[in-house]
Image (cartoon, rainbow, N blue to C red):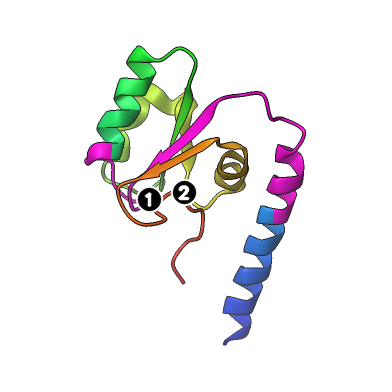
Amino acid sequence: MSFRRKLIRIIQFCKYVTAYIISRFYTNENIWLLSERGTDARDNSYWFFIFLLNNSSDVKPYFAITNDSPDKSRLKSFSNNLVEYGSFLHYLVYCRAKVLISTHIYGYAPVPSL
């Protein structure tokens, strides 16, 4: 494994541990994290996210997507509920979420591809 990959893994681990510690102090919100592959928003997770925003007052949904995604323009009006895929905020929401939903296996997990 190259030095660059090792460094990336160490940074990911530090982000996760820090987010986990912080999340233990905020446990009373009903946060749901939704995602697809992290790069798109056009499948069932996207439509369920829209449904939750419009119809559920007790759930605080977040959608994880990359900043360079071509589908991000669709989500501009929901910018308060978006998190950049792989960012520290993504790790924090991931640790605080009571429900994790994705159309792909572990699509909600904040681990970028190496």
Element type where label 2 sits in the image = loop
**Element on which disc 1 rests:** loop
The outermost residue toward the bottom is: 1
Amino acid marked by disc 2: Tyr
Percent position (x, y) of residue 95?
62, 44
Relative to residue 14, is residue 73 depicted above or below? above
Between the residue at mark 2 and the residue at mark 1, the CA separation in whole angstroms equals 6 Å
Q: x%, y% of residue 96? A: 62, 37
Going from the N terminus, do you reach mark 2 or mark 1 first? 1
Rendering coords of residue 97 (x, y %): 56, 37
Q: Residue at image x 61%, y 24%? A: 29
User: Is residue 37 magenta-colored?
Assistant: yes
* Most foreground residue, 11 or 105: 105
Tally of numbered tags: 2
48 vs 40, nearest the viewer: 48
Quarter of the rendering occupied by the N terminus: bottom right
Looking at this view, is 4 or 12 the one in front?
Answer: 12
User: In the rendering, which numbered label is found on residue 38?
Assistant: 1
Q: Which residues are magenta?
A: 17-44
- Neighbor class of circle 1 (other Cα within 10 Å; few <14, some 14-19, many 20+) is many
In the rendered image, which residue does mark 2 sit on? 85
| 96 in relation to 36, above or below | above
Residue 74's label in the rendered image is: none
* In contact (CB < 8 Å): disc 2 and disc 1: yes
